[in-house]
Image (tube, grey):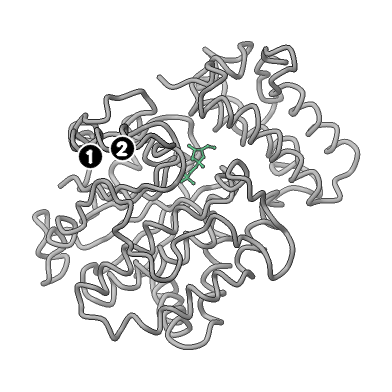
Amino acid sequence: MITSADPDSFPHSVLAERHPALIRQVRDAFPYPPDRQQALDALAAETAWSAAGTAAGRIAPLPAGAHDEARWGRWGRPYVGQSWFEVPFLWAESYFYRRLLEAVGHFGPGPWQGVDPFAPFKRAELRGAAVAEELAALDEVPGLPREEQDRAVLGGALWGNRADLGFRISAGGGTDTGAGTGGEGGGGRGAGEDARDGVIVDDADRFWRHLGPAGPASTPSGATALHLVADNAGRELIPDLILLDHLLTTGRAATAVLHVKPYPYFVSDATTADVVDCLRRITEAPGRAGRIGARLWDAMTSGRLAVRDHWFFCAPLPYAAMPDDLRADLAQAAVTVFKGDLNYRRLVGDRHHPATTPFASLTSYAPSPLLALRTLKSDVAVGLDPDVLADLERDGGAWRTGGTHAVVQFRA
Ligand SMILES: O=P(O)(O)OC[C@@]1(O)O[C@H](CO)[C@@H](O)[C@@H]1O
């Protein structure tokens, strides 16, 4: 199990550096009243790594009466009272976001109920020049041969995962709330970069073959719905929505389901409000993007594209432990696409797996065929060819955590 105990490890840097920076940024982005500021300060003190090289505080429970107190009570029983740095990394991060929302009053009651503390960063990114450029580039896609169109939309969704705002806090870019300038650094791929560069496992052809040219009815199960478990909003969710439009309009899927988070999470993870903001941004764009936006809007209003926000998507648990209702929902999918690093950690288990462990064996519990689209931003790596792994190790560098490499992994 991965923890943050080793001071030289990536998880340690997330807890000791990324989380305090995030608390400061959220505090600066809103005119919170004194009680909310004090709650943020208390969280910063509890979660800090002290100058003496030890954990400053111990994990506190949720306040009595919190709407999800029972659930977090169960999930946190082994960990409350311990050091944040000794418990599983996945649990610590997930609980940190839950506590941050508590501190800003997101769950109410009170005037800050429902206010997304990460909204200023997400909005700045949507207003940025990078999004405008990426939307304008869609005008060129219809001129490409069909296979290249497939590759372009899948590559957009894959590399869009590099544009996550939490990742940017430690990549040195910080987040930004300034109109027109937000979210320019550390984003997706630049013009002229081949979407296949840096892809260390590429099962894209198997995915397209599975869906079949004749449409979703030709998948082995006959299922016709494509499910996508979203990750970040903004520069990641826009290409995800474009991928869904592509799958619907080319007949690869009859319907689509987009799974989002029930509350703000991991800085920029998408909620229903973010889907609406992104859809509006696409719809308002000139050219082909605007037409795609209008189609997606129709698909949502007609029910061909559904949005769901199951509570399990913010749970600190691996997907192997998904509840029966979510399992039954995903079982209807021709394919479920899992986006991003955190979903990947939950898919295969947040553990120090040998990197050549087969992806299919670790995900055999999943109720439908699945495709993982992930840029590597944490230590977990599986399903690698031994030669590829040897090359990566020889080159050195932070290939596991730097967002420079990606995987497209399919399990039928
Ligand atoms: O799921 P995402 O958005 O691709 O990545 C989330 C992430 O940035 O957050 C964690 C650290 O906070 C890392 O596991 C991972 O790099």
In the image, which disc is placed on residue 388?
1
- The number of discs equals 2
Q: Secondary structure at mark 1?
A: helix
Give me the C-alpha separation between circle 1 and circle 2.
6 Å
| Amino acid beneath label 1 | Val
Q: Which residue lies under the disc numbered 2?
A: 392
Amino acid type at image mark 2: Leu
Residue at 68% of width from left, 13% of height from top?
53
Point out the image quarter for the N terminus.
top left
Badge 2, how many Cα within 10 Å: few under 14, some, many 20+?
some
Residue in the image at 71% along x and 25% along y: 63
Q: Quadrant of residue 27?
A: top right
Residue at the extreme bottom = 287
Q: Nearer the viewer, residue 232 or 333?
A: 232
Q: Position of residue 409 (x, y in %)?
A: 24, 47
Q: Position of residue 226 (x, y in %)?
A: 28, 60
